Amino acid sequence: MSVLRVAAGQAAAVAGDLLANVATAARLAREAGDRGVRLLVLPEAFLTGYDAAAFDGELPTPARLAGAELDPLREASREAGLVVVAGTALQRSDRRTLSSVVVRPDGEVAVPYDKQHLDPGERPWFTAGDHGCSITVEGVELGLSICYDGCFPEHARAAAADGALGYLSSAAYVPGGEHRRDLYYAARAVENSFYVVFSGLTGRCGASAFCGGSAVYDPEGRPLDRLDEEEGLAVADLDPGLVAATRERHAMHHDHRPSLGPRVRA
């Protein structure tokens, strides 16, 4: 497998305005393509905006996302030859979810993953997903996650155990959460000896403000590129050979025990 250039993008989203957010996503995709990026990750609920008023309103369905409203992003993906993973609030047939939309250069649009760990403030609107998910980009398998998922080591571990060489996280952290944000995703990288691509919402969206912090972490948890709160792209190369070398040198990935047995108190 060859090196895969990835980007974590961040920008402000407009609450409840799918067309405006698709236009921003398309602009970031074109900028990423100009920098040789083959995979762009965008924040949680970016296409709808992360906002209570948006969540209360009409949400896109998978069929709607496969239609003309995503054409600008689909076209940008095609022109740049890159895959885009973006977050959205979603109306599935029988439930609402926070989900990952995957747009590929051939025009395919899929919504394969729903956030499995919901923050308490999200539970009035959304239902948790019931399965993990990985995608493959140019031969490299990558696990999908959404914000709070990345706070649980077992979520990233499941992706790594299933063959993922990286972990893609679309997120939305509010000011005050910077320490935990930076700790969680670096930890997921070093625990599993794989890359983490973290994309954080930034700026104001409706009633809330968000603190960005998008970054790409290497298999030892070092940030290869990162942003503060500005709009932009954190870009780095994902090297499958470095994942293999790191796992050879630091054997935690292989030495993980399926069970620690019964627990006693002495």
Image: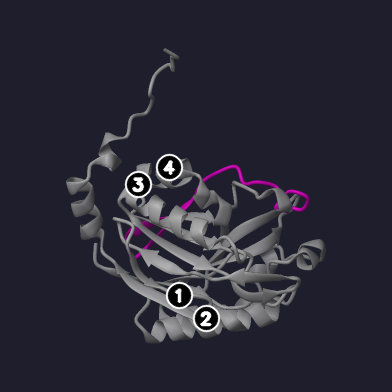
Q: What amino acid type is highlighted by mark number 1?
A: Leu
First-in-chain label (4 vs 3): 4
The colour scheme applied to this rendered structure is one colour
Task: Answer whether residue 127 is magenta in the image.
Answer: yes
Mark 3, secondary structure of its residue: helix
The residue at 33%/30% (across/down) is: 257
Q: How crowded is mark 2: few (under 14 residues within 10 Å), some or many (20 or more)?
A: some
Q: How crowded is mark 1: few (under 14 residues within 10 Å), some or many (20 or more)?
A: many
CA distance for labels 2 and 3: 29 Å
Closer-to-camera residue (173/164): 173
* Side of 117 relative to 265 (left or right): right
Mark 1, secondary structure of its residue: loop
The residue at 39%/19% (across/down) is: 261
* Residue bearing the label numbered 4: 158
**Image quadrant occupied by the N terminus:** bottom left
Q: What amino acid type is highlighted by mark number 2?
A: Glu
First-in-chain label (3 vs 1): 3
Mark 4, secondary structure of its residue: helix
Q: In this view, does 71 lie above or below 219?
A: below
* Residue bearing the label numbered 1: 227
